[in-house]
Image (tube, rainbow, N blue to C red):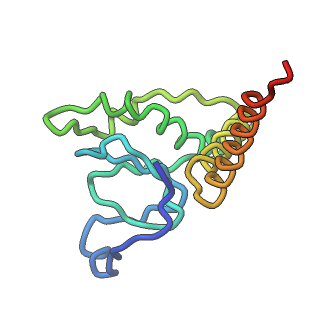
Amino acid sequence: FSDIEGVEMKVTELALKETATKWIPTNCVIIAMSGATAGRSAINKIPLTTNQHCLCLEINDKIALYRYVFHWVSFNYENIKNLGQGARGDLNSSMIKNFKIPIPSIAEQERIVSILDKFDTLTSSISEGLPKEIELRKKQYEYYRDRLLDFRG
């Protein structure tokens, strides 16, 4: 569950002309459809192409925020993964498109996204999350140290 900000391999203009490959615009929710990563999701922060093992959801921003949809899909990873069929647990586009997502107002989606993005930053960012965690652990240590070593009654 992450943002895609760069790619290792690039598609050529010739490949785009000679195949059914299409550019995916930025800020789509991309869901892996097969194999060990089935049900995992990401947001593309750059235009890109995918293979047939990905479903790219282009979100209508008048109805839903792409980050809200991403958080909902991430939250429901196990439920989506359990829809998979066959030995590899493959998904198909109908399974995903029929998966119901509650759509609150845009203002409520913004509130939810703001909270979840802050938690995501705190838990996954080594530059922000780790120092904050260390600071909180130090305060916790000091609290218990002071309580344990205070023999005044």
Q: Nearer the viewer, residue 79 or 65?
A: 79
Question: How many labels, in total?
Answer: 0
Identity of the residue furthest to the top in this view: 153
Identity of the residue furthest to the front in this view: 151
Return the x and y of residue 108 as percentages of the image width and height.
Answer: 72, 33
Return the x and y of residue 77 as percentages of the image width and height.
Answer: 41, 35
Residue positioned 28% across, 64% down in the render:
20
Quadrant position of residue 90: top left
Q: Is residue 132 above or below residue 63?
A: below
Is 88 situated left or right of 31 in this image? left
Quadrant position of residue 27: bottom right
Is 111 situated left or right of 51 in this image? right
Residue positioned 23% across, 45% down in the render:
35
Quadrant position of residue 12: bottom left
Q: Is residue 59 above or below residue 149?
A: below
Residue positioned 35% across, 76% down in the render:
10
Return the x and y of residue 39 as percentages of the image width and height.
Answer: 35, 40
Identity of the residue furthest to the left in this view: 87
Is 39 situated left or right of 140 in this image? left
Q: Nearer the viewer, residue 127 or 106?
A: 127
Quarter in which the C terminus is drawn: top right
Return the x and y of residue 11 as percentages of the image width and height.
Answer: 33, 75
